[in-house]
Amino acid sequence: MKKPLLTRKELIPLGVIIAFFAVASAILLLVPPGSPHSKWLPKCLFYKLTGLYCPGCGATRALSSLLHGDLKASLHNNLLLIPGSLTAAVLIVKPGITVRRPVAIAIVIIIAGFTILRNIPCAPFTILAPIPLP
């Protein structure tokens, strides 16, 4: 007998992720960031306190852009949203997967480098900063 791709125990977190993504997607399709009704959408506390972009800054706008079919704006708002979301989803659904030390170090270096580079206020690094809201 063939082993299933996902066990029942693994399907629960996957279902929670899918449900959360579906609700967030519906909200962002109806109320895009920057619209008059979007004042209640989450704001970045790190940015509010420091004026610097964290690795997650622009993720809400990136997801909204992606849902509206604008891949370019999505990548411009947060370049790490898609690969980071896919990585997180795999690690949540398959908790038995071990991340080897060199891979973990590479991920930390990528996130730290992205954070540092997107806060340099001159070209070409400004392309990594999120698109300002109107």
Image (cartoon, rainbow, N blue to C red):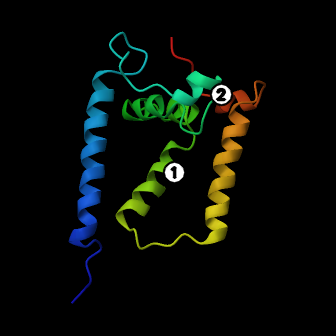
Name the residue at the front extreme: 49
**In this figure, which residue is indicated by the disc labeled 2?**
52
At 60% from the left edge and 35% from the top edge, which residue is drawn? 54
- Calculate the distance from the C-alpha at mark 1 to the C-alpha at mark 2: 22 Å
Residue 42 lies in quadrant: top left
Query: Earlier along the polypeptide chain: callout 1 or callout 2?
Result: 2
Q: Residues within 10 Å of mark 2 (few under 14, many from 20)?
A: some
Q: Secondary structure at mark 2?
A: loop
Is 54 left, or right, of 2 in this rendering? right
* The quadrant where residue 5 appears: bottom left
Q: Are marks 1 and 2 in contact (CB under 8 Å)?
A: no
Residue under the point 63% across and 29% down: 129
> Image check: 9 left or right of 33?
left
Q: What residue do we see at 54% from left, 69% from top?
A: 99
Q: Nearer the viewer, residue 128 or 40?
A: 40
Amino acid under disc 2: Leu
- Whole-percent x and y of residue 30? 28, 23
The N terminus lies in quadrant = bottom left
8 w.r.t. 69: above or below: below
Seen at 77% across and 27% down, the residue is 123
Q: Does residue 100 appear left or right of residue 92 in this picture?
A: right
Report the residue that reaches farthest toward the bottom.
Answer: 1
| Disc 1 residue type (three-letter) | Pro
Q: Please identify, in this view, whether the residue under mark 1 or under mark 2 is nearer the observer.
A: 2
- State the image coordinates of residue 69 (x, y, percent, origin top left): 40, 33
- The residue closer to the viewer here, 68 or 79, is 79
Which numbered dot is residue 62?
Answer: none
Residue 76 location, x and y as percent? 58, 32
Q: Which residue is mark 1?
A: 83
Q: Position of residue 75 (x, y in %)?
A: 55, 36
Label 1: how many Cα within 10 Å (few below 14, some 14–19, many 20+): few
User: Secondary structure under badge 1?
Assistant: helix
